Image: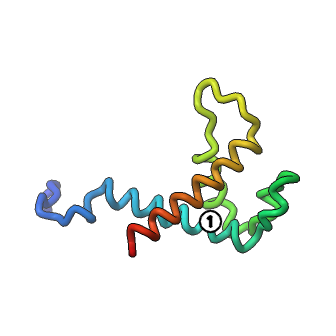
């Protein structure tokens, strides 16, 4: 019978929290890539139909990342479009920070 305990000598980068963070960064990078391929930044001023602009295969991940970043905090009365614009900025910052850290 296999032991149900996890080895304690795993490298730090293999710990569950570190792996989850890496998955999050990969998801953020994929969402940013989908945005860059499908949307023109100049169109953002007029509002964007994200679901109409992002392909069906990329939509679930893009939507998950943007909706997570655009979630309204208690007392945040900004409209969804404004929160999504801020989410795109956050997404770009996440990806840039990940690239700097990898370099």
Q: Quadrant of the C terminus?
A: bottom left
Say which residue label 1 marks: 32
Total number of numbered discs in the rendering: 1
Q: What's the colour scheme?
A: rainbow
* Residue at x-position 58% and y-position 47%: 68
Residue 23, picture quadrant: bottom left
* Residue at x-position 32% and y-position 53%: 17
Residue found at the far right of this picture: 46
Q: Position of residue 32 (x, y in %)?
A: 62, 65
Q: Quadrant of the N terminus?
A: bottom left
Residue found at the far top of this picture: 75
* Residue at x-position 54% and y-position 61%: 28
Residue 29, picture quadrant: bottom right
Q: Is residue 1 left or right of residue 60?
A: left
Asked if residue 55 is positioned above or below residue 51 in the image, the reply reads below
Residue 70, picture quadrant: top right
Q: Position of residue 8 (x, y in %)?
A: 12, 58
Viewer-closest of 67 and 101:
101
Q: Is residue 75 left or right of residue 46?
A: left
Q: Position of residue 45 (x, y in %)?
A: 84, 53
SS state under label 1: helix
Q: Is residue 82 left or right of residue 29?
A: right
How packed mark 1 is, by other alpha carbons closer than 10 Å (few <14, some 14-19, many 20 or more), is many
């Amino acid at each position: 019978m296999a032991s149900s305990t996890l080895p304690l000598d795993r490298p730090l980068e293999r710990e569950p929290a570190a792996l989850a963070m890496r998955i999050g960064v990969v998801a953020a990078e994929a969402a940013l890539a989908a945005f860059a391929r499908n949307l023109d930044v100049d169109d953002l001023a007029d509002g964007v139909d994200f679901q109409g602009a992002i392909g069906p295969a990329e939509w679930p991940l893009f939507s998950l990342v943007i909706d997570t970043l655009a979630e309204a905090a208690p007392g945040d009365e900004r409209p969804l479009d404004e929160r999504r614009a801020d989410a795109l900025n956050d997404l770009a910052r996440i990806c840039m920070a990940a690239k700097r850290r990898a370099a």
